[in-house]
Amino acid sequence: MGQIDPASYRFSVAPMMDYTDRHFRVLMRQISRRSLLYTEMVVARALHHARLEPGSSQPDGRLERLLGFDPVEKPLALQVGGDDPALLAEAAQLAADWGYDEINLNVGCPSEKVQKGRFGACLMADPAQVARCVAAMAAASPLPVTVKHRIGIDERDSYAELLGFVDSLAAAGAQRFAVHARKAWLAGLDPKQNRTIPPLRPELVHQLKRDRADLTIELNGGLTSLESCLEQLQLVDGAMVGRAAYGHPLQWAGVDRQVFADDSQPEATASSVVRGLIPHAERWRQRGKRLWPIARHLVHLVEGVEGARRWRQGLTRAAGCRDADPSVLEAAALALEERGY
């Protein structure tokens, strides 16, 4: 069993390639102290090769680039992709060694590139292999092993198949199921289309929770507001939000208070988020890194208020300079405070 009860995570921000990097996670942590955050998907085979490289775990080494994070990001889950039990077991062990709180197996991504590597959503066609992967991960690490998956793939989208899939993984040791309430078409639709064209069927996830009340079931897909999450939390154990969190981060400023009944911190404002990023930016720049990878995530922070576009343009211009330093964030925060944001 893992050290932290997976059922305690009532709200999470979904793993998203090119979005949920270490910098965005620090940004989200300014907004919610309690939510579970996820890494981008990391391929288990890439971790294996990185582990074998001399100096890979040192700053700027390959393994550090794949697994490194700022402690402020915790609680934090590492999401991995793969279909080889031995490699996934190694990844689970690494996740524990590096201080993650959970390891999550991606069985939901439908991209053609991921399918060629034989992981992601296509693995739903082979529940027995996924179960072997989960069992190997659970045996190799004390961390909770969780799975993010679809309700089905292609024509294999019956409730009976979904139930059988979940049962096999639960028996293998999976401790939480983050279920994207859309099936995936493995051919004919790209990943973006697979997030919108297959119809949402949250009722199947609700039924899954009713039929397997002892399992921890989290709903993903179509949740675009805190109100919609609170409604779903009456029916399932957790709510997972993806692009709505990235595109409108301040919309989730009430999560800790409304989902976790935690009012120990004042609700985040745009300026407090920017100021909260400054210590992280200082450490990042001390490593000789550019400011832009951090600042790029701020373009959606200020919206719907007077001067928002001008603020974004100024930040982008200043942070895009090669020698930009955290004083850019200081100036950006001050500009927001002057407007009361």
Image (tube, rainbow, N blue to C red):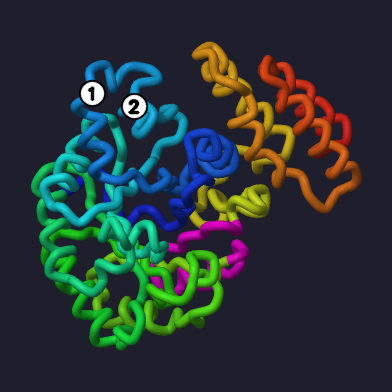
Callout 1 secondary element = loop
Q: Which residues are magenta?
A: 224-244
| Position of residue 108 in the picture relative to residue 130 (left or right) | right
Q: If the image is split into quadrants, where does the C terminus sit? A: top right
Q: Quadrant of residue 322?
A: top right
| Residue occupying image coordinates x 79% and y 29% | 317
What is the three-letter code of the residue carrying label 2?
Arg
Whole-angstrom CA distance, mark 1 to mark 2, is 8 Å
Counting other residues with Cα less than 10 Å from the Cα at mark 2, is it few (<14), some (14-19), or many (20 or more)?
many
Q: Decide: marks 1, 2 in contact (CB < 8 A)? A: yes
Badge 1 is on which residue? Answer: 53
Q: Secondary structure at mark 2?
A: helix
Q: Position of residue 270 (x, y in %)?
A: 72, 39
- Asked where in the image residue 163 lies, by quadrant, the reply is bottom left
Which residue is at a point 34% across and 27% down the rendered structure image? 62
Residue where numbered disc 2 is placed: 62
Looking at the picture, does residue 266 appear above or below residue 215?
A: above
Residue 221 in view of the camera: yes
Q: Amino acid at mark 1?
A: Glu
Magenta stretch contains residue 234:
yes
